[in-house]
Image (cartoon, helix red, strand yellow):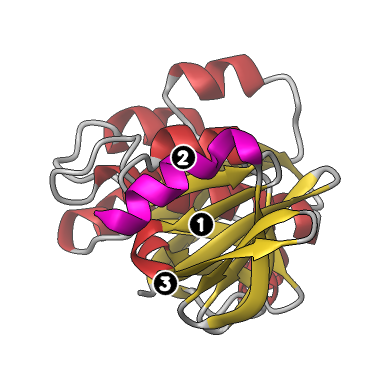
Amino acid sequence: MTYRVFIVDDEHLARERLKRLLQKHEAFAVCGEAEHGEAALRWLQENTADIMLLDIQMPGTNGLDVAKQVRQLKNPPVIIFCTAYDEYALEAFRVQALDYLLKPVRPEELTAALNRAVDWLSSLTGSQTEKERTHLSANTHKGLERIAVVDIIACLAEQKYVSVLYENGRVLVDESLKQLEEEFPSVFIRTHRSALVAKDRLHLLQSHPSGHQLLLHGLEQAIPVSRRHLAKVKEAMES
């Protein structure tokens, strides 16, 4: 899925810089741009966007007033403010902005903001609730990647991060194993304090000198099974 991004800033160079930063993220495409608030509101009357990168200090209608009017739309874009001024942060969140970035916008901060926007948009799709995401997001050398939950084989705790093993590789995510286990109880089962596996990937439970280990469809690596979680794993295997 490609997310449509609308850029609103009265400075041409600022718009061009945001477009260059967005080019590093394959999941995002610039669908339009405007150089002041009135032009932005006119554009949104005839077009839609998923995310709006919005400046605050602009000629005519400022970004805060634009955000107030955008919130009245039937399907408003997620608003991320990009501004040189830090004193408007409180007002920005009062108009339900998702994030507030200071210029010059740093690539990693934009990536983090886009990550949050994707998670928010995913929570609104169909009848999904906020606890029923269909994808996880990860910051990689390619940019922001979305991993379908149905493609995940296992999740392994690695120091401060969780390594997600899926059909096309491995990525690191910020969520903890506990968060993933609580959010997707029908998808994953805990096998060890440092491992979650997809229930539909269960293949073979084996004895091992250190206890037990689990083989999964689509993964060569064996996953440890602790004594504490052994009974539930066996039950899942039988069902």
Compared to residue 141, the image places residue 12 above or below, namely above
Q: Is residue 221 above or below residue 229?
A: below
Q: Which quadrant is home to the C terminus?
A: bottom left
Residue behind mark 3: 151
Kind of residue at disc 1? Val
Residue 13 is situated, as x and y percent measured from the top left of the image, at 72, 68
| Snapshot quadrant of residue 61 | top left
Residue contact between numbered discs 3 and 2, judged by CB atoms under 8 Å: no
Label 1 vs 2, first from the N-terminus = 1
Q: Which mark is residue 231?
A: 2
Query: What is the crowding at mark 2: few (fewer than 14 residues within 10 Å), some, or many (at least 20)?
Result: few
Identify the mark at residue 197; answer none if there is no mark. 1
Q: Looking at this view, is 30 or 223 the one in front?
A: 223
Q: How far, Cα to Cα, is label 3 from label 2? A: 25 Å
Asked if residue 84 lies left or right of residue 7, the reply is right
Closer to the observer: label 3 or label 2?
2
Mark 3 closeness class: few <14, some 14–19, many ≥20 residues within 10 Å: some
Q: What is the three-letter code of the residue carrying label 3?
A: Asp
- The region drawn magenta spans 227-239
